[in-house]
Image (spheres, grey):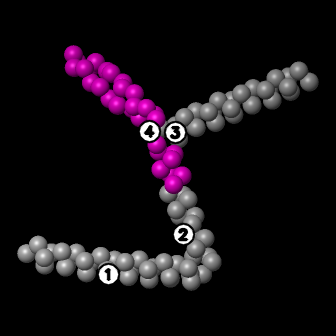
Amino acid sequence: MLLRASEYLSRVERLANRLNAELKGRQQHAPLKSRIRETLTILASFIKKLWNTELYVAEETVIAEGNKIVKPISVTLGKVLQALIILLVAYGSRAISYAQYDG
């Protein structure tokens, strides 16, 4: 029984290796537009994963009708970057406003 399973796994592994080699060959001969699209898809996926990376999980506690309810709130890299962008835009608009007022 074990020998048969081992032979089966060996055949599956050979098949997967052949498929992988064939796909790599097709990828190398693919049109430039297709390769660029694939690269952009991989890059977008990486950026999305990075954007949604959890840095910290905060807990919000609410007492409703005598029951303590704890709600986890994740702090992601994307949320931190959004906060920084809002801060910089506000600071920049304030600086422009003061420059116009002084002038």
Q: Nearer the viewer, mark 1 or mark 4?
A: 1
Q: Could you say which is closer to the camera, residue 38 or residue 70?
A: 38
Quadrant housing residue 21? bottom left
Kind of residue indicated by mark 4: Glu
Q: Could you say which is closer to the camera, residue 49 or residue 29?
A: 29
- Element type at mark 2: helix
Residue 101 is left or right of residue 10, and the answer is: right
From the image, tell me which residue sits under label 3.
Answer: 77
Quadrant housing residue 102? top right
Kind of residue indicated by mark 1: Leu
Q: Quadrant of the N terminus?
A: bottom left
Q: Nearer the viewer, mark 1 or mark 3?
A: 1
Name the chief secondary structure element in magenta: strand
- Element type at mark 3: helix
From the image, tell me which residue sits under label 2.
Answer: 38
Residue furthest front as drawn: 3
- Element type at mark 1: helix
Q: Say the numbered circle drawn on residue 54.
A: 4
From the image, tell me which residue sits under label 1.
Answer: 15
